[in-house]
């Protein structure tokens, strides 16, 4: 089954053709990041406008690179939640029109389920059940993936998502948006033990809290500025990255052990972080847990992951939508 998938939940306009949920035939991403960088973050109105301008070309290119016409695809899929409402609406309405015109089913996909499904593309042998750590710009969660379409929450962030904390701490350190990648690069040259940063406690040991850690970094930078002191930014980046990776890894591995999982996966934009990948790989191996991580190219927002999850939504539970499909800014995974 060949699915033409569309993703427009934030600042990437993306389209892909995916076969049977596991094989990418084409995968096109038009990023708006350079424009949002001018403002230090995503400007929702600009994002919607750029999606409108890009979507026709991006979908055309995905079909062209797949050497297919609309008639050759079996279904259309689209991210309908969660995300920026104006941005989501562009993809949703375009996909509705496309499915209607082509006379094909339309499959709505939850963005975070898509991030998790990126693992199916990269790892043909991965099948549920497993435990998944989702760390993106808007989400940080420990999930049970019970089957391809059923998820339940073990822990989640009480405040900021991990990616949000990376971006805000990065901004304080003087890096452009989106800062996660810049912290990752700077951390390579820094000493992760130089700055001691707080590890907030949570009532549920598998929940996260990153806002105190982020504020600590911001205060450190402001205090140094006021005193005219020079901070070692590479080491601050390394210390911050180490602390976030350590919090995510410790809680995730403990949750996997307590719930008896021997198979685990990582998903979301922060899964691209080299410190997190290395630490999680090592600690999962020490606990005898087989860990799956998507390649960096599939960690950030893309439509191939949406096409993958759409295949399972359609074939496992027959999920489809009609012209009444609406976009939702927020929606829980389960
Ligand atoms: O999943 P994603 O592309 O978008 C959302 O669904 O939110 O995640 C974007 C987030 C941003 O916060 C970005 O800074 C972070 O992922 N990110 C990273 C890295 N690459 C992207 N964070 C840390 N290290 C990276 N290498
Ligand atoms: Zn995302």
Image (tube, grey):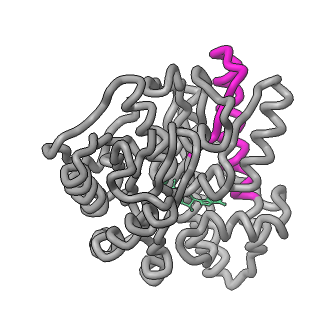
Image point (32%, 70%), residue name: 56
Q: Is residue 203 left or right of residue 126?
A: left
Whether residue 200 can be seen here: no
Identify the residue at image location x=63%, y=40%: 266
Left or right? Give the position of 199 relative to 69. Answer: right
Query: From what the image shows, is residue 69 above or below residue 276?
Result: below
| Magenta segment boundaries in residue numbering | 239-267
Question: Residue 277: x and y, percent?
Answer: 74, 47
Q: Is residue 246 magenta?
A: yes
Question: Percent from the top left, x then y, of residue 143?
Answer: 53, 29
User: Splitting the image into four quadrants, where does ligand 1 fall?
Assistant: bottom right
Measured along the vertical axis of the image, is residue 163 above or below residue 109?
below
The quarter holding residue 169 reads: bottom right
Residue 199: x %, y % from top left: 65, 44
Report the front residue among 200 and 207: 207
**Looking at the image, which residue is at 58% across and 20% down?**
129
């Amino acid at each position: 089954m060949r699915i033409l998938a569309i993703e427009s939940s934030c600042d990437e306009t993306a389209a892909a053709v995916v076969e049977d949920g596991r094989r990418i035939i084409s995968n096109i991403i038009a990023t708006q990041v350079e424009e949002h960088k001018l403002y230090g973050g995503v400007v929702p109105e600009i994002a919607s406008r750029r999606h409108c301008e890009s979507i026709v070309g991006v979908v055309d290119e995905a079909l062209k690179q797949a050497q297919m016409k609309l008639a050759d695809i079996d279904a259309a899929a689209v991210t309908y939640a969660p995300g920026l409402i104006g941005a989501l609406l562009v993809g949703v309405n375009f996909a509705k029109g496309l499915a209607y015109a082509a006379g094909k089913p339309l499959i709505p996909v939850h963005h975070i389920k898509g991030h998790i499904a990126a693992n199916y593309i990269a790892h043909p042998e991965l099948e549920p059940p497993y435990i998944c750590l989702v760390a993106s710009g808007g989400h940080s969660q420990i999930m049970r993936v019970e089957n391809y379409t059923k998820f339940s929450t073990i822990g989640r962030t009480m405040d900021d998502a991990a990616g949000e904390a990376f971006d805000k701490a990065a901004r304080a350190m003087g890096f452009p948006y989106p800062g996660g990648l810049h912290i990752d690069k700077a951390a390579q040259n820094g000493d992760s033990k130089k700055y001691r940063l707080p590890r907030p406690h949570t009532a549920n040991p598998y929940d996260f809290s990153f806002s105190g850690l982020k504020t600590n970094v911001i205060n450190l930078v402001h205090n140094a500025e006021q005193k005219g002191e020079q901070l070692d930014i590479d080491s601050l980046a390394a210390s911050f990255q180490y602390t976030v990776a350590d919090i995510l890894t410790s809680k995730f591995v403990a949750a996997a052990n307590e719930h008896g999982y021997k198979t685990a996966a990582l998903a979301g934009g922060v899964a691209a972080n080299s410190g997190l990948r290395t630490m999680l790989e090592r600690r999962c191996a020490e606990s005898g847990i087989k860990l799956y991580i998507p390649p960096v190219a599939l960690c950030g927002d893309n439509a191939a992951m949406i096409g993958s999850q759409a295949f399972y939504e359609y074939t496992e539970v027959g999920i489809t939508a009609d012209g009444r499909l609406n976009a939702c800014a927020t929606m829980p995974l389960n």
